[in-house]
Image: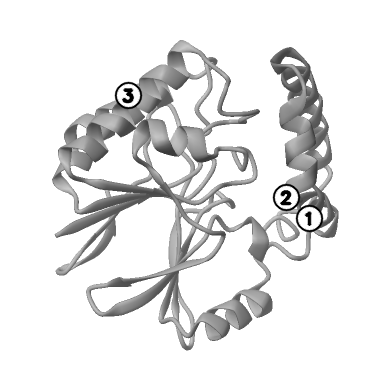
Amino acid sequence: MTYYFIADLHLNENQPEITRLFLQFMQEKAPLAQAVYILGDLFDFWIGDDEESELISNVKNAIKTLTTSGTKCYFICGNRDFLIGKSFSEQTGMVILPDYHVIDLFGTSTLLCHGDTLCTDDKKYQQFRKKVHQKWRQAIFLMFPLSWRIRIAEKIRAKSKQEKRGKSAEIMDVNTEFTAQIVTKFKVEQLIHGHTHRQAIHNHNHFTRIVLGDWKADYASILEVKKQGTRFI
């Protein structure tokens, strides 16, 4: 059995090469797996399940084809696409998981998350995250016309990019002490997450932390887990 883990593709119309890489992965590699886990930021931003485009249609069809074939597909929301909801799930067969989810990988208890919740040193972002994840705020936002939501999302994204330039790399990385506490809380031996775009396998004292990388036009960060071992392909 094989499991694949990916994150931080940030699919958008301006980078069609990444979309092609994703569709190629879904057609060639993913059907051979027991399950595919997408740990957030599949899209560069998501303003509601009622949004339509050729890109969205192609992605939905690829996921639907995969799940129909028998390979399970799971999703944990990222900081860009946390509004992916029930309608998207029903249309594709993709199962939406909570922010933290524990699975067993060949006898190794493993915690999955996007990774943004681990970056506690970025207090301004954590305050923003707490607000936008409130269900009543999301409900109000989704009541706005699609065109309004697009403009709001573009303003938020532009502001986020501007603020990011002024932050240190350390602030935008995970807080090691908090991360260790989370691992202890869930009583796991391994943690897999994305968000920081720093592909690596870290061996800590009591657990292994695997960081998924972001996707580029010429590189797809795919973690392959088999009984024989774990590697990036």
Q: Nearer the viewer, residue 48 or 221?
A: 48
Q: Give the spatial CA distance, label 3 vs label 2.
A: 27 Å
Q: Nearer the viewer, residue 31 or 212?
A: 31
Is residue 80 in view? yes
The image position of residue 211, as x and y in percent, is: 47, 59
Circle nearer the N terminus (3, 2): 3
> According to the image, label 2 marks what residue?
133
Crowding at label 1, few (<14), some or many (≥20) Cα neighbours within 10 Å? few
The image position of residue 104, as x and y in percent, is: 31, 73
Q: Secondary structure at mark 2?
A: loop
* Residue drawn at x 59%, y 80% as measured from the top left: 180
The image position of residue 106, as x and y in percent, is: 22, 74
Q: Is residue 107 left or right of residue 218?
A: left
Residue 24 to residue 110: above or below = above
- Amino acid under label 3? Asn
> According to the image, label 3 marks what residue?
61
- Amino acid under label 1? Lys
